[in-house]
Structures are given as structure tokens and as C-alpha cells.
Amino acid sequence: MVLFLLLDLMHTGNSSLSAEGLKMSIIQNDQFAIKLGVTGRVSHRSDRWDEVCYGNIKQILITHGDAINSIQLAYDYNGIPILAHRHGGNGDRFDCINLLSWETLTVVKGYYGPVGNDGIHVVLSLTFVTSGGTTYGPFGRESGTPFCFNIRNGVHFWGFHGFSNSSYLCNIGIYVKPTAEYKHHFLPQPQKFVAAVSACKAS
Ligand SMILES: *[C@@H]1O[C@H](CO)[C@@H](O)[C@H](O)[C@H]1NC(C)=O
């Protein structure tokens, strides 16, 4: 009975999350975070970055023009303000979003598409919506393929990840963390699935 329940949980968990674009989940400090994205295809001309568990975001700094050139985040890490690395390069314009201490991100959306003649995709536009209902953006250029990370229903924003080079923010994704405290995390390992099925049949 218990084993059947486990299979059901694993099954519904996987299918509902994959519809949202689940690629991977991670466990950090005994807490698990779900990694969503990245947007578009990844080019070999960019480097991967990850920023998770740095604390509450205080500021989002963006350089942009005909695309998003860079994103840089300032965090409140247990009362200490820290400025993280800039991901990307210079742009024609610069904007800074100042979040209030209680504000969190509820929507991260935008567009991706080709920026030059090489047809390689980068993030063209970014818009952020916060728990206060404020919309910041769009920054960059709204054309190409739209994407949207909706942070609702039992999860909250936990960090960004992506790919960038010295000119552009090429891809972006987010981490979300379940609001509930889960004690166990089942990895979608095929061999465990098979073992559980045969155990059910034997009993
Ligand atoms: C950065 O990445 C974009 C998209 O992949 C590419 O078009 C551009 O040439 C890259 N720039 C550098 C300096 O590698």
C-alpha cells in the first residue's frame, strides 16, 4: 500500500512539474530547490552561472539595448548587502530595480531570439513582477519567442541561473523552492521505480 502511494506521488510529481519545464532539482543545505529553464538553446559561446541561496534580492541591475546585455543582482545576505558578479556585458542603456525588503519576484518573463546575423539566441527582453503587484520593464526589445516563469501556488523564488558571455545574457532560468517543508526528496531514478513495482507484485 505504501509503495503504491510512493509511485503515485512520484508519477504526479513528475508529470505536473515537467509541464512547467522541469529540467532538474537540487538539494542544498537539506532544502530542495527546483530548477526551471533555461530559455532557448545554449550556445557554446557562453558560460554557465548559478546564483541560488544568496538571500533576498535588493536590486536588479540591467544593461540593455537591442537585447539584454547583462544582469547583476544585489542581495541582502543576513543583513549584509552583497553585490554579485555581473553576467554579460555593456549595453546602451542601464536600469536598476529597487525591491522593497518584503517584496519577492512572482513573475519573470520576456523574449529570446537571435540578436545578430549568426542566428544564435540570446535573451532579448526581461520583465519582472513582484508580490507587491509592481511590474518592472520590459527592458530590452520585445520580439522573438516569449517565455514566462510564473512563481505561484506553493513555491517561491529562490534564485537565478543562466548562460552569458562578455556581450549578452544568452539564456536565463530560475530556481524555486517549495513553500512547504518536505522531509524526503525522491529522485526520478528508473532502477528505484522498477524495484518498487516488483515489490508491489510480490506482496
Ligand atoms: C555571445 O553570445 C552570442 C550568442 O551566442 C554570440 O552571438 C556572440 O558572438 C557572443 N559573444 C562573444 C564575445 O563571444
Image (spheres, rainbow, N blue to C red):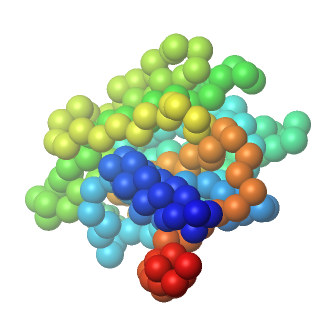
Q: Position of residue 24 (x, y in %)?
A: 48, 64
Q: How many marks?
A: 0
Does residue 120 appear to the left or right of 54 in the view shown? left
Residue 126 percent across, percent down from the top left: 38, 35
Residue at 88%, 37% (x, y): give it: 79
Tell which of 64 and 126 is nearer to you.
126
Can you say whether 31 is above or below 128 in the image?
Answer: below
Quadrant (top left/top right/bottom left/bottom right) for the C terminus:
bottom right
**Picture residue at 47% right of the left edge, 79% below the top:** 201
> Observer-nearest residue: 173 or 19?
19
* Observer-nearest of 9 and 146: 9
> Taking the image as drawn, is residue 163 in sight?
no
Q: Is residue 119 above or below residue 142?
A: below
> Residue lying furthest right in this view?
79
Q: Quadrant of the N terminus?
A: bottom right
Looking at the image, the residue that sits furthest to the top is 133
Q: Position of residue 177 (x, y in %)?
A: 62, 46
Q: Look at the picture and state if 120 lies above or below 64.
A: below
**Residue at the front extreme of this rendering:** 203
Residue in the picture at 18% in, 36% down = 143
Front position in the image: 6 or 101: 6
Q: Give left or right: position of 193 versus 143.
A: right
Q: Is residue 185 visible?
A: yes
Q: Residue at x 69, y 41 (%)?
A: 180
Left or right of residue 92: residue 57: right
Is 155 placed above or below 19 here?
above
Image region (quadrant) for ligand 1: bottom left
